[in-house]
Amino acid sequence: MQVPAPFEYARATSVEEALVLLDRLGPEARLIAGGHSLLPMMKLRLATPEHLVDINPLERELRYIREEDGEVRIGALTRHRDLLESDLLAERLPIFRDAERAIADPPVRNRGSIGGALCHADPAEDLSAVCAALGARVVIRGRDGERSVDMTHFHRGPFSTAVGDGEMLVEVRIPLREHAGSAQEKVKRRAGDWAIAAAAVMLQLDGPNIGDAGIALTAVGVSEPRSRWAEEALRGSPPSEEAFAEAARRAAVECDPIGDQRGPAEYKRHLAGELTKRALRRAAQRALAEEV
Amino acid sequence: MRVNVTVNGEQRSAEIEDRLLLVHFLRQTLGLTGTHWGCDTSNCGTCVVLVDGEAVKSCTMLAAMADGHEVTTVEGLEHDGKLDPVQEGFMEAHGLQCGFCTPAMMLTARALLDRNPHPTDEEIREAISGTLCRCTGYKNIVAAIRWAADHPAAAETAPKEVQA
């Protein structure tokens, strides 16, 4: 039987109370939201927090998807299912539906949250790349106030983020762009599994050419959250097969996958390029469809 | 710590260890062994129960997190000796072989039909995709849920004001 090591459970009923509890309980306390990353790691004793602060009662404060000031704002406790079923995201940021359709399975999506996924920072997790490609910022709150961090500075390495002791991620903010399209492509071994590789992209058109682009890869050992060199191949070019092929080539060169039970390194590198290309095609179609 | 959970409509209260998982609370503390305990790793989905009407994997939720919430297990599907249409569907369409995944499949079906009374086969397949049937009897499971969708209980089809 797999059970977590002993810990003390506490429950917060407001963001403020969660921050007070984190402050009082110290660095060995962890927040728990959906728990679908943390509890499995606790069962394996890869995580052994002394205190858990349950933030599920904070749904009224932190479970929302709304458009505000030219941004889509997503509360940290918004569940995967909400992201999958949101009409606003389907219309404005369809990359979320691409990703969510292939994240785990429905019961897991009923519990897991965007804040939990980002803060757990598993290198094979999909939403980090989605948010990075979109140029998102995250809002981190502590007892002394709030700060906002660009997704490109959010991850400090595997399972490590910019969220400090006594702080919590409360919101994800994604700028809404005109004439833009986004898409994610993922290959996995079987339904519900983690990615062998995935590519998240955003394209913004400026007249006949690409004005701005975001490319972020999952599970292929990228050193930076965004594949900047691949993005540069797109800016100023028309949304053509040639431009996509060059960006894909660069994305594959830039990553550094390791061979494991999900496949050899060269296969993953091939996927990084191919999935980048497919995602760019789809994002371009969406950007152009919005034009009409 | 003490938890108060409404299980199958009944208020249940118990003193538990903070780290107790919901699946073990149901099976060991309350003796409701209809909820099956399979892989321990959130993969097999045989431990699915409904929490506030939504399917969740009870091996990946603390019993403490269910405090103050409503849990439905397979024991709660039947009412006053009358089977839920989902249970009847599994009988009519031979929706089980070994039966190990069946409680989870039936609860998942109940949650689906509560939200979407007329699902397509594709929607049924998507809904049950979090639970594995090692007998691979998916075709009949989908048929069983289809049967339940086509034969809703009287209360589900009756006008709201008639329900008491």
Image: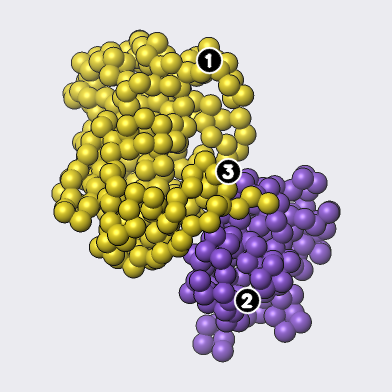
Q: Give the left or right position of residue A292, taking residue A6 as reference.
A: left
Mark 1 belongs to which subunit? A
Mark 3 belongs to which subunit? A
| CB within 8 Å, label 3 to label 2 | no
Q: Mark 3 points at which residue?
A: A44
- For marks 3 and 1, the one nearer the N-term is 3
Chain B is which colour? purple
Q: Where is residue B86 in the image (x, y as percent from the top left)?
A: 70, 66
The disc labelled 3 sits on which kind of residue? Leu
Q: Residue at x 29, y 65 (%)?
A: A17
Which secondary structure lies at badge 3?
loop
Q: Give the left or right position of residue B118, taking residue A101 as reference.
A: right
Chain A is which colour? yellow
Which secondary structure lies at badge 1?
helix
Q: Residue at x 45, y 22 (%)?
A: A220
Q: Which residue is drawn at 43% across and 21% down?
A: A221
How dense is the environment of label 2, judged by Cα within 10 Å: few (below 14), some, or many (20 and up)? some
Name the mark on residue A265: 1
Q: In which quarter of the image is residue A149?
A: top left
Q: Relative to the observer, which residue lies in front, A258 or B15? A: B15
The disc labelled 2 sits on which kind of residue? Asn
